[in-house]
Image (tube, rainbow, N blue to C red):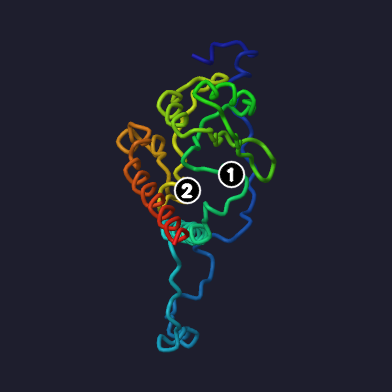
Amino acid sequence: MTQFLPPNLLALFAPRDPIPYLPPANKLPHEKKVGGYIGVGTFLKYFEDPKETPPPVRVETREERLERRRRERAEQVAYKLEQEIAVWDPAGISNVTADPFKTLFVARINYDTSESKLRREFEVYGPVKKIVVIHNTVNGKPRGYAFIEYEHERDMHSAYKHADGKKIDGRRVLVDVERARTVKGWLPRRLGGGLGGTRRGGPDVNIKHSGREDNERERERYRLERERETSGRGLDRDR
């Protein structure tokens, strides 16, 4: 059918010029000369003698490295904790109240709460003798807890019963008796002791109560021993 087309359209179907031939840059595979395959016996002298080979060095895996570092950190923390427990002496702490049995421990205090505000809030239970607000020894900022000493022990017990959960400057405080100097063998939370356990982990780990009454019997036993020792020294003095 193309023979019936006009010349201007036939020119569109005209074949192109053939591709010019160029010789190959390299020889064809069948034209190359190869040396053929030989054995590897000549290279045996370069191999290492198995008898002289040192034992392979075992490299710890990522899991083993993480476990080792975790174990080392735990050992360092345990050693530091042991050293701090050895030098822990609550009776030698400076800037404390005079009578621990008249002292109330107040925690979860607002950092902006002043000593005068604490005095006003806790004087409703009885006359306050001394207030010690604990501050950070490095930057001087309050640490959120304080010790309040009352004139009479009954006032301290009244505050212990009624002031727990009291809202001061937008935060509900937690009150407890001083245990460092009234319970034998007592350790603070930073040394592995304390009563805090409401934020250890999940609901199956955390305790549901504050733990204030857990050591009341031990505290009372220590109190009786102290009174017995004091009365014994008084009798010896009278003799």
Where 149 falls versus 83 (above or below)? above
| Mark 2: amino acid | Arg
Q: Is residue 69 visible?
A: no
Quarter of the image for residue 206 reads top left
Where 93 falls versus 168 (above or below)? below
Q: x, y (%) of residue 90?
A: 52, 51
* Front in this rendered view, residue 239 or 180: 239
Q: x, y (%) of residue 140?
A: 69, 40
Q: Circles 1 and 2: CB distance less than 8 Å?
A: yes
SS at circle 2: loop
Circle on res. 181: 2
Residue at 40% x, 27% y is 161
Asked whether, in this view, residue 179 is left or right of residue 211, the answer is right
Residue at the farthest front position = 239
Quarter of the image for residue 95 reads top right
Q: Which residue position is annotated with label 1?
A: 96
- Compare marks 1 and 2 and give the one earlier in the sequence: 1
